[in-house]
Amino acid sequence: MFTSNQPECHFSLVLISLLSCTTNQARLTVSPSSSQFFKGDFVSLSCEEDDSSAGWTLRRNTSKGNTTQCGDGWGTSANLSCDISYIVERDSGVYWCESREGPISNMVNLTVTDGSVILQSPVLPVMEGDDVTLLCKTKTTPSNLPAAFFKDGVFIGNESTGHMTIQHVSRSDEGLYKCDISGHGESPSSWITVTGDTLTCLCFCSFQHSQCDDNLMTVFALF
């Protein structure tokens, strides 16, 4: 069961460990930078790395509970990128970069909806003290309509143009966010993570294939 201060996860049980980053750690980026997408959007995911010899592969775990890599029934692989030309709801899931040596990049949870409203929020963890802008967006034109915003199910404000900026975020701003546009509907929820000054990265461990660094700091069990 999840409490209000835990991220939603609808996939098979995984362990996520915070550990000290290594020199060949990859960084997964998403373009456009969002954790939510409309069905039919174009999405490009890239494994950015310092050591090109590491041989990074983009993998994902969807609601079906199976792990597959880019090109294995989804996406088109090009160098260190993977393009999804027409993303659909079954593409919702957790994405990460993995090398032949085993280390894993940060993980990104993407949500695809067939609805008419999404919340564009930071894909990667944000630093304490930074300003964070949320955009409540409709699939139709105009997209910048008045919107109501919610954190952990609690109303936090209305914005006339669909943009909400949270200034100088702190750990208390971490949580599940969603938005609602009257007459159009409600977005899915997305978890926003706020980090401190310590440089950390995420390591993905499955029960069958655990290669996390020994120098782990915290382990979370997600159901």
Image (cartoon, rainbow, N blue to C red):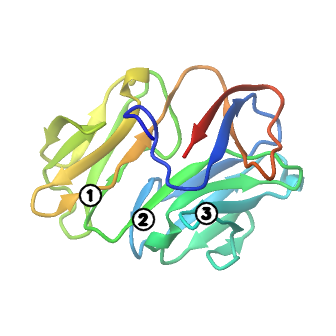
Residue 180: x and y in percent read 19, 52
Query: CA–CA distance between discs 2 and 1?
Result: 14 Å
Q: Is residue 170 visible?
A: no
Left or right of 21? Residue 151 is left
Crowding near the residue tagged with mark 1, few <14, some 14–19, many ≥20 C-alpha atoms within 10 Å: many
In the image, farthest residue toward the front: 1
Most foreground residue, 84 or 8? 8
Return the residue nearer the eye: 40 or 64.
64
The residue beneath circle 1 is 137
- Local packing at callout 2 (Cα closer than 10 Å; few below 14, some 14-19, many 20+) is many
Residue 45 visible in the current orientation:
yes
Q: Is residue 161 above or below residue 170?
A: below
Q: Secondary structure at mark 1?
A: strand
Q: Which residue is mark 3?
A: 65
What residue is rendered at 66% in x and 41% in y?
15
Q: Nearer the viewer, residue 106 or 214?
A: 214
Image quadrant assignment for residue 177 = top left
**Residue type at tag 1:** Lys
Which badge, 1 or 3, is on the more N-terminal residue?
Answer: 3
